[in-house]
Amino acid sequence: MRRQSLIPFGLLILLVVIPSCAPSAQQILASSESQVKLRAIQTRAFDTPDKTKTLRTVIATLQDLGFVVDKADENLGVVSGTKLAGYALRMTVTVRPYGETKVHVRASAHFGLRVVEDPEPYQQFFDALSKAMFLTAQEVE
Amino acid sequence: MKERAISHSVGRILIALCFLCSCAPKIPKEALQLSNESLQNRQLQTRRFDTDEKTLLAASAAVLQDLGFTIDESETKLGTIVCSKRCDATNAGQIAVAILVAALTGVPMPIDREQLVRASLVTNPIQEDETDKAKCRTAVRVTFQRIVFTDQRGASRLECINDPKLYQEFFEKLSKSLFLEAHEI
């Protein structure tokens, strides 16, 4: 008797939990971090005016990390790639000139259904990129 | 007895809740970290050719076509070609095991049916000479990955292909293609 009464209770909890996992129209523009904070996590400045060379180094770094390039556009300064290793990790990197002597590199990663908002993976990516660029990645205000 | 049954069902509900709450898995720690194999894979996937970047890209596109790939994207300014192909992934050994398991247990086992192979090819000039092509040197790096789909509408494998034989064969075909293009055959 008491065991049976638990079933509707369990179903009720499931009904509350399931919608919070499923994507809906509201999820399209959803993000948990603030816009400013996310930009700071995802962006670094490098002391080089050469956008094309930076883009080429970004591609080489992505390849070193096991990514296959999906799209690359020199004019827009965008490179996207996917890594498959039992999971699928998608990444978009943009390179924009900043002033006369710098470029801003911004990376955004998507894992499963979520945007990666944890600073550590980005730090690892920029560490790998700075090694390949022979330049230090500077944090951006 | 009844209490035990109740505690069991509560336990089950709690486990189910844990699974549902963690339905968005976190990014693995090593996902964006350079590993020891990174350098090894780079060497495996890279070759240098005594030619200019434009010729190498054209020859590469021709090889990818020879191998039945469709070019999805290309950006010559960054020396990049992105291509893919779908092909058969059935494996006689796996089918035999699946039939055996199905006969013994009555449960059909998913078997690999087809695979989506994706590759990106990136060239990088090492030495440039505008007047003489023969003095140019260009590196090319190709990376293959694949998703294997089963007959039960799921993906069984998502992986980067690091088989040395595959890369060796690809580069042999590429140097042949370069030779053919140089002689306009």
Image: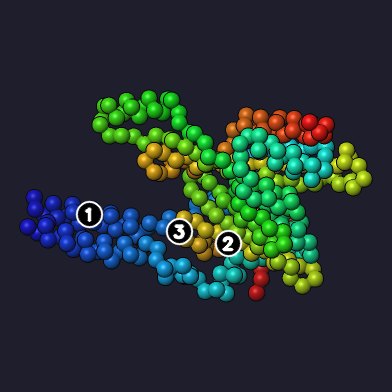
Pick out the residue farthest to the right.
B131
CA separation in Å, label 3 and label 1: 28 Å
Q: Residue at x 47, y 39 (%)?
A: B148
Q: Is residue B112 left or right of residue B73?
A: left
Amino acid type of the residue tagged 1 in the rendering: Gly
Q: According to the image, label 2 marks what residue?
A: A108
Amino acid type of the residue tagged 2 in the rendering: Ser
Label 3 crowd (10 A; few <14 / some 14-19 / many >=20): few
Q: Residue at x 14, y 55 (%)?
A: B6
**Between residues A26 and A99, which one lies in front from this camera angle?**
A26
Label 1 crowd (10 A; few <14 / some 14-19 / many >=20): few
Q: Are marks 3 and 2 on the same chain?
A: yes
The location of residue B82, given as percent across then percent down, is 64, 47
Mark 3 vs mark 1: in front: 3
**Between residues A100 and B122, which one lies in front from this camera angle?**
B122
Does the rendering let one see residue A137? Answer: no
**Between residues A89 and B131, which one lies in front from this camera angle?**
B131
Does the rendering let one see residue B55? Answer: yes
User: Helix, strand or loop at disc 3?
Assistant: loop
CA separation in Å, label 3 and label 2: 13 Å
Q: Which mark is residue A5?
A: none
Pick out the residue farthest to the front.
B185
Q: Chain of mark 2?
A: A
Q: Which mark is residue A113?
A: 3
CA separation in Å, label 1 and label 2: 39 Å
Mark 1 vs mark 2: in front: 2
Q: Are marks 3 and 1 on the same chain?
A: no
Q: According to the image, label 1 marks what residue?
A: B11
The location of residue A109, given as percent across then percent down, is 55, 59
- Image quadrant containing the C terminus of chain B: top right
User: Helix, strand or loop at disc 1?
Assistant: helix
- Number of residue marks: 3
